[in-house]
């Protein structure tokens, strides 16, 4: 297709290569990130994922060799051959990734497809060529991670997927090619190397990770540009950082968004939501957020309230706020086609809706019946949608939940030729589909930012790469199946590796009836996922923490309280993520990739670097095998020290989720509150697992953007072992006025005889497994012997 290399030119960070039939470009973004581009549709990248990209000025050389052109950065060697074949080497000249030179060749599928299809079997296609396709060689040691919210296991090797945002409420199983999100990014882990590839193409894209043939994997599309980034790094963490350097980091959310959230399709009428709120307080279960699903609206008209079921929404929301609850309302994209309805009329008058091929406003059916679809690919429409958020904000709504934005529709999918403004370029549904939810979230984010001046809380179902800048996500309509509890772990871990740190699944499962045991186990996973929301569908049995029996209620309370204890740790992780791009919930492979035993662990995960969670995810199980990576780990419940690098067997009765803390960890804790902000927290608890370690705790007002101008505090803890333990406390940044007055130190060891802070003796108490004492929250050296 490209033909032979004819010549090349080199300007700034770009190398333009003229082939016989086409032009190819190599762009050096940073020493670790190189873009491979050829225009098939647009001359420029026209990226929806990457905004305001900063090209790092770096030295690189370009040379013409006999058979190839060589681009050398400080970290990468890129060799470009005829036909725009591109190979990547590290600086030691070891090959990381090369284009496959052979023919595509699928394995044989014996039998007769048409007969099987008649009975309803789905028959997989054989080789399927795409206009744009890049085929990479498989060396044999590859494992693949990322790709957003795909079903199945952590490692994607041997499977194929498509990126086409899809709302399919039937049970999500391993054979699904696509769900709600399109994040065309994956990380390859090889025995000694790791790198990521981000195909920035928002048309339908295809990923085959060695399913068609075990000698190669490929990615491609039938439209858009050939436009991919090769991202390398010393480890997976650096690759994630590189990917989020391009597409953006998950911003620090308001602190209450990390509290427990309760949802249901739908809490209605208003007396029901008041009852749910009161139950939380009466039953001593912390909760920060209640969600209102579609039935709060008048005839499903967005930005309206059903005045019969919710006669006084402002008063309701105020009462709930006084009781410590924030309310999040659902907003779908579909606008009811109804004359006299202001949102519809306004949009129609201004041509804000997508149109059909003849330029007539396109109509499809969603909840309100016949509906029209705002064209979020037009900045004017986004600005209008952003303004509409004010209607909700003025009523007292604290966050917006964007659903159905794949977009989903009842009368068949939107036809390919539905027309959008596409930022002035014009484009059809095949181009906008995968970014529709992304652009809707962006509009919602901007509206909430403007009208609250707080960090926006948006939850979206549909996504594209980079949506993390605007929105948290949930994984759509799972079911109350054990299989879906199991799947939630690799799914959230892969979303995290795909840049989406703030994510969650419907705890307890959306469709189907949950059981007491399933909810008891699910809350043990949910309390560690960044978005912690129990949600269930109408027509299923109640699923609130108290909806089953006393035991289930107690287990819910125990883990929701644990969540509130860990709030400062989770908040710190999100704060760190603004710099590192690392998610809260991480697969073990992210930090222990040298240990091949963790590469495929689907039923354990890390929270940050220090906490390992190994939940029970099978009905009836009361014990499980747990692999602990190398190093020393402390059992969170018994305080027993365990040597890692081996599999242990752990008893896990229904109320116990196995949790392990790495030796050398320092974990901040808050007292349990009914909701974030209920208590003024003057004393920060520091849970210490003696060893060598370092931790930085971050504190700010938890809601505004003042931290961006320096209004925050940092508390730095450095722990060293040897002749007891010393903990050096520093406060390198203290510009937020409401700091702590004391630290409550918990030392997870009882072999202690003497504690001194800045040379003075400190009295301590010895409890069952820990030694406890308080000190002033100031700089100093704590010596524990
Ligand atoms: O399928 O608004 O995924 O969370 O409760 C119905 C009703 C549409 C789908 C969402 C679900 C929500 C439901 N919605």
Image (cartoon, rainbow, N blue to C red):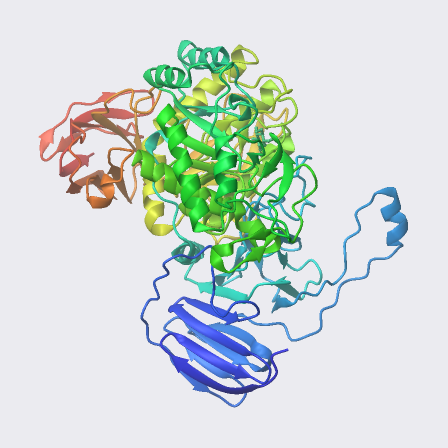
| Residue 471 appears left or right of 128 | left
Task: Name the quadrant where ligand 1 sits.
Answer: top right
- Note whether residue 599 is visible: no
Q: Please tell me whether residue 333 is drawn above or below residue 555 in the rendered image.
A: below
Location of residue 754 by image quarter: top left
| Residue 638 appears left or right of 364 | left
Residue at 57% across, 70% down: 40
Q: What is the quadrant of the C terminus in the image?
A: top left
Q: Please tell me whether residue 125 is drawn above or below residue 472 in the rendered image.
A: below
For the image shown, how many numbered marks are present on the structure?
Answer: 0
Q: Please tell me whether residue 75 is drawn above or below residue 535 in the rendered image.
A: below
Residue 503, percent from left and from top: 47, 39
Residue 98, percent from left and from top: 56, 72
Residue at 51% across, 36% down: 345
- Note whether residue 216 is visible: yes
Residue 237, percent from left and from top: 42, 54
Residue at the far bottom: name it.
Answer: 66
Residue 14, percent from left and from top: 41, 75
- Foreground: 440 or 227? 440
Q: What is the quadrant of the N terminus in the image?
A: bottom right
Q: Please tell me whether residue 624 is drawn above or below residue 189 in the rendered image.
A: above
- Foreground: 379 or 210? 379
Location of residue 625 by image quarter: top right
């Amino acid at each position: 297709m490209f033909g032979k290399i004819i010549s090349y030119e080199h300007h700034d960070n770009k190398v333009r290569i003229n082939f016989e039939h086409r032009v190819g470009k190599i762009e050096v973004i940073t020493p670790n990130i190189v873009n491979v581009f050829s225009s098939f549709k647009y001359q420029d990248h026209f990226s929806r994922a990457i905004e305001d990209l900063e090209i790092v000025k770096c030295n690189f050389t370009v040379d013409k060799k006999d058979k190839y052109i060589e681009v050398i950065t400080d970290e990468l060697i890129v060799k470009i051959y005829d036909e725009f074949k591109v190979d990547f080497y590290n600086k030691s000249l070891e090959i990381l990734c090369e284009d496959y030179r052979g023919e595509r060749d699928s394995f044989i599928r014996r039998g007769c497809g048409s007969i099987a299809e008649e009975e309803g079997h789905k028959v997989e296609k054989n080789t399927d060529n795409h206009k744009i396709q890049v085929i990479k060689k498989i060396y044999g040691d590859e494992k693949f991670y990322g790709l957003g919210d795909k079903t199945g296991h952590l490692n994607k090797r041997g499977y194929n997927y498509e990126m086409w945002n899809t709302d399919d409420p039937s049970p999500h199983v391993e054979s699904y090619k696509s769900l709600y999100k399109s994040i065309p990014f994956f990380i390859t882990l090889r025995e000694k190397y790791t790198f990521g590839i981000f195909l920035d193409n928002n048309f339908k894209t295809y990923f085959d990770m060695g399913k068609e043939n075990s000698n190669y994997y490929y990615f491609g599309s039938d439209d858009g540009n050939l436009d991919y980034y090769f991202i390398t790094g010393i480890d997976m963490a650096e690759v994630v950082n590189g990917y989020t350097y391009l597409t953006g980091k998950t911003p620090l959310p308001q602190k209450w968004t990390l509290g427990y959230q309760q949802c249901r399709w739908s809490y209605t009428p208003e007396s029901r939501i008041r009852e749910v709120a009161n139950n939380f307080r009466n039953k001593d279960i912390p909760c920060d957020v209640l969600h209102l699903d579609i039935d709060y609206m008048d005839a499903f008209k967005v930005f309206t309230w059903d005045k019969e079921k919710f006669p006084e929404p402002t008063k309701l929301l105020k009462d709930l706020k006084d009781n410590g609850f924030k309310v999040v309302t659902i907003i779908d994209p579909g606008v009811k086609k109804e004359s006299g309805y202001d949102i519809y009329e306004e949009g129609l008058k201004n041509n804000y809706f997508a149109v059909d091929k003849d330029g007539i406003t396109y109509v499809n059916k969603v909840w309100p019946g016949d509906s029209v679809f705002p064209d979020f690919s037009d900045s004017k429409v986004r600005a209008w949608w952003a303004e509409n958020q004010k209607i909700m904000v003025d009523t007292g709504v604290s966050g917006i939940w964007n659903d159905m934005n794949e977009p989903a529709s009842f009368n068949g999918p939107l036809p390919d030729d539905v027309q959008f403004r596409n930022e002035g370029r014009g484009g059809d549904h095949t181009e906008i589909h995968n970014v529709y939810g992304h652009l809707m979230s962006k509009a919602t984010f901007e509206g909430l930012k403007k009208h609250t001046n707080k960090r926006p809380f948006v939850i979206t179902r549909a996504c594209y790469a980079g949506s993390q800048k605007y929105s948290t996500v949930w994984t759509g309509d799972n079911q109350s199946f054990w299989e879906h509890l199991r799947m939630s772990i690799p799914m959230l871990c892969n979303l995290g590796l795909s840049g989406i740190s703030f994510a969650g699944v419907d705890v307890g499962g959306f469709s189907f009836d949950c059981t007491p045991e399933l909810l008891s186990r699910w809350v043990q996973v949910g309390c560690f996922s960044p978005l912690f929301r129990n949600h269930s569908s109408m027509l299923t049995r109640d699923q609130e923490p108290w909806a089953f029996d006393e035991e289930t209620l107690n287990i819910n309370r125990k883990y929701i309280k644990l969540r509130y204890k860990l709030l400062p740790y989770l908040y710190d992780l999100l704060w760190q993520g603004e710099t590192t791009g690392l998610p809260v919930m991480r697969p073990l492979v992210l930090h222990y990739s040298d240990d091949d035993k963790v590469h495929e662990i689907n039923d354990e995960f890390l929270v940050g670097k220090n906490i390992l969670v190994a939940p029970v995810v099978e009905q009836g199980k009361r014990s499980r095998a747990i692999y602990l990576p190398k190093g020393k780990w402390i059992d969170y419940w018994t305080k027993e020290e365990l040597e890692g690098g081996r599999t242990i067997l752990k008893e896990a009765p229904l109320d116990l989720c196995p949790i392990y803390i790495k030796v050398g960890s320092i974990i901040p804790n808050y007292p349990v509150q009914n909701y974030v902000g209920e208590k003024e927290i003057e004393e920060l608890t520091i849970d210490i697992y003696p060893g060598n370690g370092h931790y930085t705790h971050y504190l700010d007002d938890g809601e505004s953007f003042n931290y961006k101008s320096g209004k925050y505090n940092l508390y730095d803890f450095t722990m060293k072992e040897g002749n007891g333990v010393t903990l050096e406390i520093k406060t390198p940044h203290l510009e937020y006025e409401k700091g702590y007055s004391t630290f409550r130190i918990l030392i997870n060891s009882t072999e202690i005889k003497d504690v001194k802070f800045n040379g003075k003796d400190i009295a301590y108490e010895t409890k069952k497994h820990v030694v406890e004492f308080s000190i002033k929250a100031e700089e100093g050296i704590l010596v524990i012997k």
